[in-house]
Amino acid sequence: MRRADAAGPAPRVGPAREILREAGIVPLELEMGEALPIMSGSTVVAAAYLAALHRAEAQADHAEGAFALFMEAIRAEPGSLDARTHAERAIPEQEQVVARLRALLRGSEFMTDRTRRRFNPEDTHRIQDAVSVRAAPHILASLRRNLHHSRQILGKELNASTSNPLLFRDGDGEVEFVMGGNWDGAVMGHGLDALNAGLVDAGVLSQELSARLLSSRWSYGLPANLAGGTVGLNSGMVQLQTVATALIPEMQARAFPSGTLSRPAKDGQEDHNSMAMASLRNLRANQERLDTVLAVQYLMSAQGVDLVIRGIRDGAPPPRLGDGTRRIHAVIRSRIAELENDRNLTRDLHEMTGLVHGDLLLRAVRGTRTEIVSRR
């Protein structure tokens, strides 16, 4: 499936027969022995792995988009995105993450000393931001490396012969049946475990960042619990952030590598099993949770941005968001109103989770990607 930001038509999901027909590929009529490899566990894992990878790439983009909007809300120090620092580490994925973040934040007036003072005159003695802020590009780079590793695994797997036995012609031209283990899913299973761990760590980071926005001290002066007006039964956004806090331990419990849990079966004939399907199920369950965790961060960061604007009362024009964060904020506000007086946020969270799972917000996050790629 083609990425949405690559050259050519946008990706489309549909029945295989229709997609093949549109591509000018005649579906094969299966012959004797060909159905089993398609039905086997490793083939099913490969197909579901591909779908999970496509979703994970979108979630990695959202992790960067939500982090960029968080940096605006917290009026973060831009030094952690300095290209020179990341060049010293020489990790390509890290440099690419930072390049995308700089593009999303290009032109921002929030992350300046002037805006910090305009909003909070006491915010004048920052030395450096918290570890979760400064190390976020490194954490998200690790996820990008796991994504790259998964693409390499699937690139081989989707073009492999995984049947058993396999048929070869020997030197005399005779057909030889060779029994082997090409159906084994260990490589995919361990790749799934690694990708799951990377997504969970991105979720942990997201929850830590949204928690910072609740605290007036940690957020450098934002109202406690991001309350925009009269505080009622819902206490601003504290219950919203509690949802993310509750989901993280569930994600961590499902991040244990299933590939280490082999059990013998069938009277010892199948005495080692990859457990790749269990790895896949854990990954997909955590992807459901991660959408909600990222939705919480998006909602709270957008609220933080609005409270900064509202809290500046010097009569001058409000500070400008970055090129990408302005698009992100506009999409969120096109669907979900700013929290002014206290209200129940269940509907807001459902709407925001839908935005994370859909295409509209993703297009806003990815709007600068073509420009970045063309400059390399």
Image (spheres, rainbow, N blue to C red):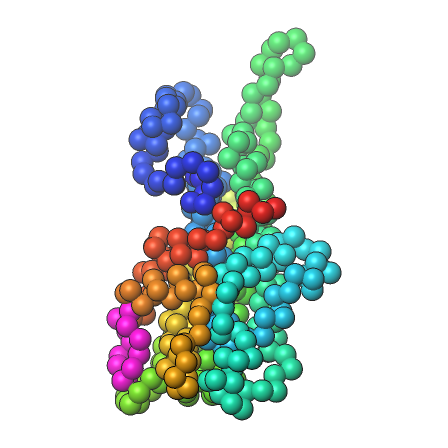
The answer to whether 130 appears left or right of 67 in the picture is right
Q: Is residue 319 magenta?
A: no
Q: Pinpoint residue 13: horizontal percent, then vertical percent.
A: 34, 41
Hey, which residue is sitting farthest right in the picture?
88
Q: Between 295 and 76, which is closer to the camera in this rendering?
A: 76
Q: Between 245 and 223, which is closer to the camera in this rendering?
A: 223
- Answer whether residue 103 is visible to the viewer in this image: yes
- Answer whether residue 300 is visible to the viewer in this image: no
Count how many numbered circles sit on residues in the image. Answer: 0
Q: Between 368 and 219, which is closer to the camera in this rendering?
A: 368
What residue is at 38 percent from the left and 27 percent from the top?
Answer: 23
Hey, which residue is sitting farthest top in the picture?
172
Hey, which residue is sitting farthest front in the picture?
316
Q: Pinpoint residue 65: horizontal percent, then vertical percent.
A: 46, 62
Splitting the image into 4 quarters, where does residue 79 fall? bottom right
Is residue 10 shown above or below 127?
above
Q: Between 241 and 99, which is closer to the camera in this rendering?
A: 99
Splitting the image into 4 quarters, where does residue 310 fall? bottom left
Q: Quadrant of the N terminus?
A: top left
What residue is at 53 percent from the left and 74 percent from the top?
Answer: 111
Q: Pinpoint residue 204: horizontal percent, then vertical percent.
A: 51, 70
Is residue 82 shown above or below 375?
below
Is residue 176 shown above or below 180?
above
State the extent of the magenta-drawn residues as a range. 336-347
What residue is at 49 percent from the left and 74 percent from the top?
Answer: 110
Is most of the magenta stretch helix, strand or loop?
loop
Splitting the image into 4 quarters, where does residue 142 fall? bottom right
